[in-house]
Amino acid sequence: APGVYQLASLLVELDTSDEASRILRADALYQMGCVEEAHKLLSQTLSENPQSSPILARLALLQLKKGFMYDGNQLLKKVIRIGDTSCLLPIIDIFKDEDRKLMQTHCHCRALTILKGKCED
């Protein structure tokens, strides 16, 4: 992760608008345990492209990790509304096991709640 972070930082210096390099940098920060720094970097990147599903999904995980369920849900809803959920599967590979389970459990529980609500209607 430290080597990836250094490489991504160099790429960001070459092109500060390159979203992929900024995401790679945030992923490396996350892997190194610098969750707050990763969150800050993703938030800055999101302000420049508010419709970026890969950024929204990563921010959702970080919000869930902090215990901010409502915020995490809102970010996941936005990913779904945008319609680009293809970013979720590759992101799962980046997450640490505990966070992967957190995201999967959370999404599963939310899906069940939604389905139960529709069944009752």
Image (tube, rainbow, N blue to C red):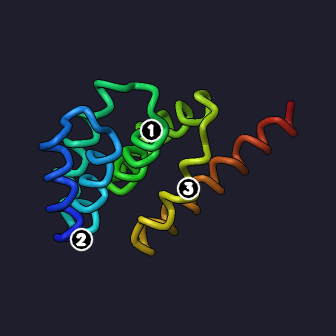
84 sits to left or right of 28: right
52 sits to left or right of 31: right
x and y, in percent, of residue 48 in the image? 29, 24
Which of label 2 and label 1 is nearer to you?
A: 2
Residue at mark 3 to residue at mark 1: CA–CA distance? 11 Å
| Above or below 99: residue 65 | above
Instruction: Locate the N terminus and report the quarter of the image it occupies.
Output: bottom left
Name of the residue lying farthest toward the front: 14
x and y, in percent, of residue 88 in the image? 55, 52
Secondary structure at badge 1 equals helix
Labels 2 and 1 touching (C-beta < 8 A): no
Task: State the residue at coordinates (41%, 52%).
Answer: 61
Task: State the residue at coordinates (18%, 70%).
Answer: 3
Residue at mark 2 to residue at mark 1: CA–CA distance? 30 Å
Secondary structure at badge 2 equals loop
Residue 93 vs residue 99, the one in the foreground = 93
* Residue marked by disc 2: 1
Instruction: Locate the C terminus and report the quarter of the image it occupies.
Output: top right
* Residue marked by disc 1: 70
* Residue marked by disc 3: 106
Residue at mark 3 to residue at mark 2: CA–CA distance? 27 Å
| Above or below 80: residue 24 | below
Which of label 3 and label 2 is nearer to you?
A: 2
Mark 3 vs 1, N-terminal side: 1
